[in-house]
Amino acid sequence: MNLFEKYKLRRVINACGKMTHLCGAIVLPEIAEEASESLRHFFVLDELQAAAGRLIANATGAESGCVTACTSAGITLCVAATMSENNLAQVLQLPDTTGMPSRVLIQKGHCVNYGQPVTQAIRLSGAVAQEVGTIHRCLPEELRLQLERGDVTAIVHVESHHTARFGWVRLPQVVQLAHEFDVPVIVDGAAQDLRLAELIRTGADLVITSAHKYLCSTTGGIVAGRRSLIEAVYLQNKGIGRPMKAGKEAIIGAMAALDYRQHQDISAWTSVQDRKFERILEALADVAGLTLSVDPDPNGCPFSRARLTPDPMICKHSAADLRDALADGDPTIVVRAHHVEEGYINLDAIEMTDEEVEYVCAAIRRILTNG
C-alpha cells in the first residue's frame, strides 16, 4: 500500500534524527510484528501493564515500571504521583493540589521546549514549576535553599542536548541533595533510552524515556523507578492520566523494544552508524567553502553527527538557506537545524539508508556548487 499516494503526502528523508515532528522512528520489523499482533487480541490492561513493569525492571535495574502515552505525558503523571502518592482520593482531587506539597524545582537551564515547554508538562498536574538559578548558572546552594523552604514535591531534571550545557548541577548531586529532604527526583530522559540503566543507577526515583526514539518502537513513554511511585503513576489513570493512557500496541511495542534491546549488539549498531557518518564526510570533503566536523552525541550516546558549516561568501548559501533548499522538494530532506542561527546544520544518519545518504550528499553538493 502506498500511503504517500493515497493520502497525497510527501516522502521524507530523515537526516534529523529521532524527532516527534517526523513521527518518531522507523519501527523495527521484530517490534512491529508484536505490536501488530497485539491489535488482534484483548488483554486485561492491569495484567499487561504489570508484565511491562516486570520487563522494564529487568531491562533497567529499576524496581518497576509502566508505559504511558509518551514522555511528555510521563512527566505530568510522575509529578502527579509524587503529590498524590497512592491515595486515590487525592488522585481524584488533582489538579487541585490543596493539602499536598506542590512545588516542583527545575533548574532554569533545564526549562526546555521540546514542542511543549517542560514547565507546562509539570503544571498540567496542578503543580507549580519553580525555576531555580539562571540559564547558565545554578548552584547546589540555590537548590538547597528551595528545599529548605519546604512544600517541594519533586525535582525535575532534564537530560537533553536542549539544556544549557554548562553551569548546572549534575544529576548525581541533584539526587543526593533531594534525598536529604526525602524529595524524589524525576528525570526527563526522552532520547536517553541508551542510557536508561545508567540514569537509574544515579538513584533517581523516576526516569522517563521514549519508546519511539532509539528503541524504534510504537509511540509510547517508558517510566522506570521506585515501585511505590510507579504504582502511584499508574494510579493516575483513574484521574488526570485517563486521557494520557497507553494503548495495547504502545505497551506491547515498548515491551518488544526493551526485549530486543537486551539482546542487541550495541557495538555493531554503532559501527553501522559510524560507517554512514564517515561516508557523509568522504562524499562532501571536496565541496569548496563547506567545513565538515564531528559532533559526538552531547549526552554520551554511542554515535556522532556530521556538522556542516557553509561559508556564504563561497557557497552562496547560509546554513539556513541550505536547510530550506533541502526541505523544498519531494522527497523533502529534513536536516538537524538546532544550530542554524550559529551558522551550521547537522546530518544525523541513523534513520537514513545507505541510498538516502548518497541522495542527501548529492543534493547538498548540487545546492552548494550550483550544479
Image (tube, rainbow, N blue to C red):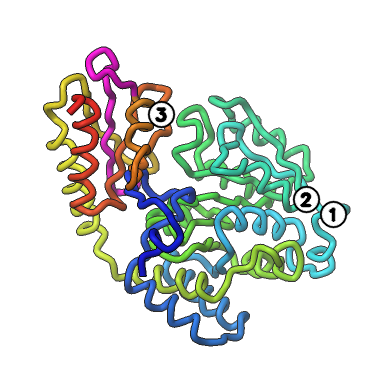
Q: Which mark is residue 6?
A: none
> CB under 8 Å between callouts 2 and 1?
yes
Q: Estimate the spatial distance between the alpha carbons at disc 2 and disc 1, rounded to whole Å.
A: 6 Å
Q: In front: 159, or 205? A: 159
Q: Estimate the spatial distance between the alpha carbons at disc 3 and disc 2, rounded to whole Å.
A: 34 Å
Q: Earlier in the sequence, mark 3 or mark 2?
A: 2
In x, y percent, where is residue 272? 20, 54
The amino acid pointed to by label 1 is Asp
Membership of 307 in magenta stretch: yes
Mark 3 lies on residue = 339
Residue found 26% across the figure and 59% down from its top? 266
Q: Quadrant of residue 317?
A: top left
* Other-residue count near label 1 (Cα within 10 Å), few / some / many at <14 / 14–19 / ≥20: some
In x, y percent, where is residue 240? 74, 62
* Other-residue count near label 2 (Cα within 10 Å), few / some / many at <14 / 14–19 / ≥20: many
The nearer-to-camera label among 3 and 2 is: 3
Picture layout, residue 40 above or below residue 214: below
Q: Quadrant of the image for the C terminus?
A: top left
Question: Which residues are the magenta region?
Answer: 301-318
Q: Secondary structure at mark 3?
A: loop
Q: Secondary structure at mark 1?
A: loop
Mark 1 lies on residue = 96
In this rendering, would 137 be left or right of 192?
right
Membership of 20 in magenta stretch: no
